[in-house]
Amino acid sequence: MKIQKQIQQKAYVSDGFIGKYQKLVSSTVIPYQYNVLNDRAEGAEKSHVVQNFINAGKAVRGEDPGDGFYGMVFQDSDAAKWIEAAAYSLSNFPDPVLEKQLDDLVDLIAAAQDKDGYLDTYFTVKDREKRWTNLLEAHELYCAGHMAEAACACYEALGKRKLLDVMLKNTAHLYKVFIEDKHGGFPGHPEIELAQMKMYRLTGERKCLELAEYFINSRGCDTGYYKRECEARSWKVWGNDPGNADYQQSGVPLREAKDAVGHAVRAVYLYTGMADLSSETGDTELYEACKRLWKSITARQMYITGGIGSTVHGEAFSTDYDLPPDTSYAETCASIGLMFFASRMLENEVRGEYADVMEQAFYNTVLAGMQLDGKRFFYVNPLECVPGISGVSPTHRHDLTQRPGWYACACCPPNAARLISSFGKYAYGENEDTAFCHLFAAGTVSFENGISIECDTEYPYGYTIKYRVSGKGRLAVRIPAWSEKYYLSVNGKVSDIKPVNGYAYIHVTDGSEITLTLDDTPRFVYASTKVPRLTGYAAVCRGPLVYCFEGADNGGDVLSLKLDTSADISAFSEPDLLGGTVRLSIPAVRITGTDGLYSAHRPEETPCTAYAVPYYTWGNRGENQMRVWLPISK
């Protein structure tokens, strides 16, 4: 049984830093992405997403499907994620134009659904006879999962039921194929598992729960399935290796899994579904597996920025402590998926470490994935970038110095938009008598248990968080592990409440005022000596923000800088820099005097000051060098 659950979308009204980002998504990101879906965005690669649904509708009606299908096999998911973002955004900022665009797109999707409930434009338009013959690569269940999530968002946030009915019909189709007709197999790209759990919680339809259980329980039990499937067909999408069980997270039954392996986004989507199922059914064995996988990621395979999936080869986890800063992959979607996983782990057990990582991933990798103006996006998030090498060298070609406007494989931009628009669902949770504050987000929240709060904070730049409470019960406030000291007061009196698993549980009544003051001292952070390349290096953090050193602040050159970690770090508010930020200055030395490629002469070290800005802001001032980790001078 869930210890606590996410709040409903409409329960949170944003303000402050999060509110600013949600307004940016509403005013800029969602309209831009809608134009992309309709092939009207200047300079963006052709999407054809909306036209694919129009053409599929024609095919369903027996008409000529026009110019056919174009794009990736999973192109439908871009529409689904846009709908989800739009639905959540509309609940925050009503907009009749956007609402009509959403309704019109849902109408096109409904018209593209086959009579038996099947919904996937690639196969409806292009290869109708090949349905369900390539679970390994073809993303049918992945697309169905994202559309199911979109349907849940439309109903939860807006009360719109049309897409939900479409996806309940699709669920009935999936149930017939995989449960009743015993088709066998499981998706190459997990997503359907977490989506069916969302559908189950929203509708109570048992088929949704049984489908999620089926796909989770089947995975890793029939290790030869993909090989047999591949041998039985004469076509492929990419030519994925059906025998690479690690890449598909299918080498062992999931309850026996110990290490996070394979494609990072697929992994954390799968683990999210596992954690959700365990909290819903009380499956302690499944939760124990989730805890092992969580530890595998966060203790041995996660960047300081909350980025995961270190290698470009397969966009995947590689091996423990392999976290190179300059060739890191760290896909934006993977950190979004890590937040999903953390949120579901919190439903099994309220532990601060889950919310700590959720916060770490959001304020660093997720936000870094989007330019400050909301118009350009990173798919890959390196921790070191050097123009002339990054994006150029074969080993660094994936690590770009500037955010592109769009991608042919455009999973990350709409993923970030839907997460930011629904931020409150991750920031707050509830049960019968307790309101949980997992993340610090200004605004108002109304919980189903009768408690409501108003949160006032300038987080992540200000570290005082004030809650004004209406109602009666308990307020559970996370005390971040990064805050070495903190002060908690209740109704103006200093409280000596001891945190339990990272949360302070406070009994509140109508009118209670809670103030939490966290440590705003900038700090040096050091990596394990097991991580190659980082021994003798330090990073700089303040609060949840990881900082980086850009050439724009350091005379164009950060490669010659070494930090003096024996000195204090100074913080300066910069309201006109990068949308308003806090810049850090650190005593350092600059290495000079080496001529030529190599020299027998010891380089000179000249004292200087190094300046750092939050990692999420990097790459917004043109192409320049960037480093998160710098060597230590002393």
Image (cartoon, helix red, strand yellow):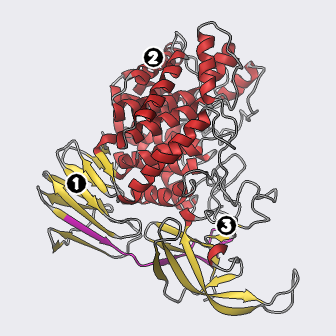
Residue matched to label 2: 169
Give SS at disc 2. Answer: helix
Residue 204: quadrant of the picture: top left
Q: Tag 2: residue type?
A: Lys
Residue at the spot x=20%, y=72% of the render? Answer: 496
**In the rendered view, would you say 279 is above or below 535?**
above
Q: Residue 586: image x %, image y %?
A: 55, 84
**In the rendered view, would you say 298 is above or below 448?**
below
Whether the residues at callouts 3 and 2 have beta carbons within 8 Å, the answer is no
Left or right of 510 in this view: 496: right
Task: State whether residue 156 appears in this view.
Answer: yes
Question: Disc 3 and disc 2: Cα gap in Å?
Answer: 47 Å
Q: Quadrant of the C terminus?
A: bottom right
Residue matched to label 1: 453
Q: Residue 592: image x %, image y %?
A: 76, 88
Which residues, given as a range, are shown in magenta?
514-539
Give SS at disc 1. Answer: strand
